[in-house]
């Protein structure tokens, strides 16, 4: 005779007739109540971004840490129960230092992430009569980001002990919609700056509020500098760059003919540049904005990302010697100084 579901809930190691571990499923559901965390891997490093929930005006924002350093070349973002994450992160730090002491090298990112997953499975009754280490699964998921001999790495761990390698991943509340947006906007040749803007864009869509240096946290891990978490001043500059990009795009849309603006909902513009070269060219062709990452044919630096016309337009494009970012639509050019003060800069144009 089968037990009822409530009776299967009593044991963390008891499978139901359907092959399910309810306690593990409950732990995974608890993660969906946590603040969102996002990781994006690029050829130049990994960017991590999280939401910081400020529930009271008396709460000191700096006391909330959702991105932490594990080793000089590894960091992690968390979502779920903060108390559980502290146990896992302390374990990961000890594993990293033990590896360095024994082998005289930095621990590989995958090995460290695997050790975290091994700990996640050690719940319930201990093996061979040993005392149980913990009575329930951890209610936290981690995005482990680092750089080693394999290059930038991003791994996702969950309470079931699963370890998955990702290019871009979102966890926590609203992660389903965030993951959909990442799939639309991510491309492998992203720069770190573009990845930062993408993380901010997705965070803003999920949080549905204005981004500030007090309600988000941003960090990056690069092969040269290792783990770096952005200060409030650096965060404010990155957020301002994100909104300036949207201002310019909004201004270009406002300069379009009314008939052209009606086609904007169908436009797919996945590549939002975070650093604009002095000329950012935007055109409407075949009912979509055509943007290519080719280098400017004029005098801007080869490393400056930009968008150029494709196919070429009949009128000549202006040269890259303007002091402010510019968007050209048709023969009408819009610079940052032409943005109307009343324009809502907290929403994307497209």
Image (cartoon, grey):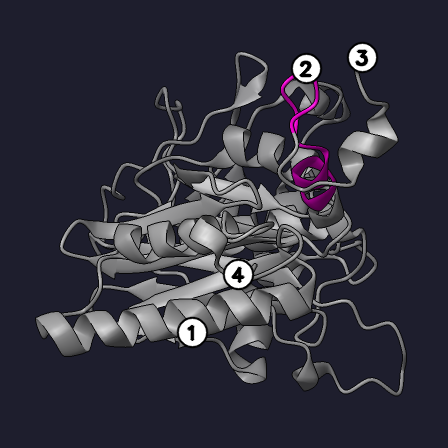
Q: Residue at x 56, y 83 (%)?
A: 233
Q: Nearer the viewer, mark 2 or mark 3?
A: 3
Q: Which residue is mark 3?
A: 1
Q: Which residues are magenta?
A: 15-27
Across and down, in percent, residue 191 comes to 34, 51
* Disc 2 from disc 4: Cα separation: 33 Å
- Residue shown at 80%/51% (left/top)? 208
Residue 17 locus on image (x, y percent)? 69, 15
Disc number at residue 69? 1
Q: Disc 1 and disc 4: Cα gap in Å?
A: 9 Å
What residue would you read off at disc 2? 18
* Mark-to-mark CA distance, 2 and 3: 14 Å
Residue 109: numbered disc: none
Question: From the viewer's perspective, is residue 245 above or below residue 76?
Answer: above
* Secondary structure found at label 2: loop
| Mark sitting on residue 77 | 4
Q: Is residue 17 magenta?
A: yes
Marks 2 and 4: which is nearer the front? 2
Corner quadrant of residue 57: bottom right
Residue at coordinates 86% horizontally, 23% vertically from top-left?
A: 4
- Looking at the image, residue 320 lies above or below residue 161: below
Circle nearer the N terminus (2, 4): 2
Give the secondary structure at mark 4. strand
Q: Nearer the viewer, mark 3 or mark 4?
A: 3
Disc 3: CA contacts within 10 A as few (<14), some (14-19) or many (>=20): few
Quarter occupied by the C terminus? top right
């Amino acid at each position: 005779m089968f037990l009822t579901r409530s009776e299967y809930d009593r044991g963390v190691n008891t499978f139901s007739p359907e092959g399910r571990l309810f306690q593990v499923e409950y732990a995974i559901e608890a993660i969906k109540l946590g603040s969102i965390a996002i990781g994006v891997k690029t050829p130049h490093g990994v960017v991590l971004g999280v939401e910081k929930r400020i529930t009271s005006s008396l709460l000191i924002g700096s006391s909330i840490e959702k991105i932490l350093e594990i080793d000089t070349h590894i960091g992690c973002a968390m979502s779920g129960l903060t108390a559980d994450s502290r146990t896992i992160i302390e374990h990961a730090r000890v594993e990293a230092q033990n590896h360095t002491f024994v082998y005289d090298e930095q621990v590989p990112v995958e090995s460290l992430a695997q050790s975290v997953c091994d700990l996640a499975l050690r719940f319930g009754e201990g093996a061979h009569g040993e005392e149980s280490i913990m009575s329930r699964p951890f209610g936290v998921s981690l995005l482990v980001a680092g750089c080693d001999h394999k290059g930038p790495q991003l791994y996702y761990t969950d309470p079931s002990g699963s370890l998955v390698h990702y290019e871009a991943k979102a966890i926590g509340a609203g992660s389903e919609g965030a993951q959909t947006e990442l799939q639309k906007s991510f491309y492998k040749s992203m720069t770190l700056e573009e990845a930062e803007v993408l993380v901010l864009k997705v965070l803003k869509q999920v949080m549905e509020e204005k981004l500030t240096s007090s309600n988000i946290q941003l960090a990056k891990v690069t092969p040269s500098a290792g783990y770096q978490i952005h200060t409030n001043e650096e965060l404010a500059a990155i957020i301002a760059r994100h909104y300036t990009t949207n201002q310019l795009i909004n201004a270009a849309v406002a300069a379009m003919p009314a008939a052209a603006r009606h086609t904007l909902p169908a436009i797919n513009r996945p590549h939002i540049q975070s650093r604009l070269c002095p000329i950012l060219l935007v055109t409407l062709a075949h009912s979509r904005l055509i943007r290519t990452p080719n280098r400017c044919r004029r005098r801007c630096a080869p490393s400056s990302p930009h968008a150029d016309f494709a196919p070429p337009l009949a009128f000549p494009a202006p040269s890259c010697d303007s002091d402010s970012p510019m968007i050209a639509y048709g023969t009408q050019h819009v610079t940052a100084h032409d943005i109307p003060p009343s324009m809502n800069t907290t929403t994307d144009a497209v």
